[in-house]
Amino acid sequence: MIFVKIASWLPFWWIYFWFRMTAYFAFYVLKYRRGVVHENIKKSFPDLSDEDRLKIEKQFYLQFMEVFAEFTKSYSFKKKDWEQRCKLINPEVLQAHLSKGEPILLLSGHVANWEWPAHAISQQIGYPMEFLFKSIKKESYQGIMHKLRTRHGGLPIPKDTALREIIKRKNVPRVIGMIADQIPSMGTEKRWVNFLNQESAFYVGAEKIASSVNYPVYFSDTVRVSKGHYEVTFRPIAQPPYAESPAVIEKYAQLLEEAINRNPADYLWSHKRWKYNRKQADTASNQ
């Protein structure tokens, strides 16, 4: 943590330089998850040439390390830095709900910089920002991530107890963020959606939360404008009242795919997003 604090005061170009070197080392020497990245991109973009897919792979490693560089640097950010570096294009969309006392469920994916928007919202929107997180096995690393994520006013909620915690303060106006593109554990409830040219499993938690507490649901669409500069647009997914279960997952998957297709290298391809298929999941559930 001391390293992060010191590094956050270094100029951006210096931090970018070292993390860029790390990206080259991860790609060419360690070959960190090269097979996973290659297969994910190949299955998601079958019509691209091998050369074009390799370009995406290389660019992914560079931009992946840039996210870590920016996350480190942002430890020392002030409000003006968030306003300059992570611009909210249409904050009035969220404020219209919050000013009426309506909490909001805000979904995002591992696109561009997936850490900054929550902090930028917390600093700029004028209402509390909470976000769901999955516990990390390595306690020392989780401690660092917790300090970084709460540094600018965010409140983390463990995914395992999320619905219970949200219901406790059901009517408190706030933004609840959720990165919802991870693959569910094989034995858990899931929704199968055609996503990036393949049948993909999604958590149904976001949809359950929305229908349980009647929250409006939005997608946080983050675009990398230039190195270290982002724009976030809030796009509608579902609005209460919900007469029946809202199609949150399908709309979310559609908006996420559009964001990925805009700049494929900006997605987190090292995640084992498709480590099992529907047939394997069905077989496991019947055993």
Image: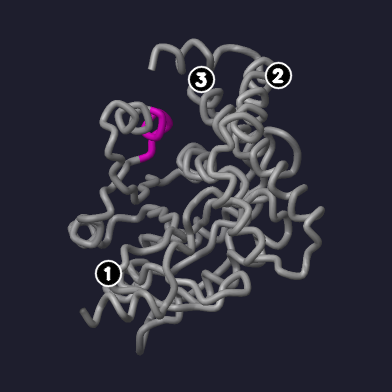
Find residue 2 and report its horizontal and vertical position in percent.
40, 12
Left/right placement of residue 158 relative to residue 183 reads: left
Q: Going 46% across and 18% down the picture, which residue do you hit?
A: 4
Within 10 Å of disc 2 (Cα), the crowding (few <14, some 14-19, many 20+) is: few
Q: Going 45% across and 13% down the picture, which residue do you hit?
A: 3
Nearest to the eye among marks 3 and 2: give it. 2
Foreground: 171 or 134? 134
Of marks 1 and 3, which one's residue comes earlier in the chain? 3
Find residue 70 and report its horizontal and vertical position in percent.
58, 30
Q: Which secondary structure lies at badge 3?
A: helix
Foreground: 95 or 159? 159
Foreground: 227 or 60? 60
Within 10 Å of disc 3 (Cα), the crowding (few <14, some 14-19, many 20+) is: some
Q: Which mark is residue 122?
A: none
**Label 1 to label 3: alpha-carbon separation:** 39 Å
Find residue 38 and report its horizontal and vertical position in percent.
63, 53
Q: Going 69% across and 49% down the picture, which residue do you hit?
A: 265
Left/right placement of residue 11 relative to residue 140 reads: right
Residue type pointed to by label 2:
Trp
Q: How many marks?
A: 3
The residue singled out by tag 2 in the image is: 13
Q: Which secondary structure lies at badge 2?
A: helix
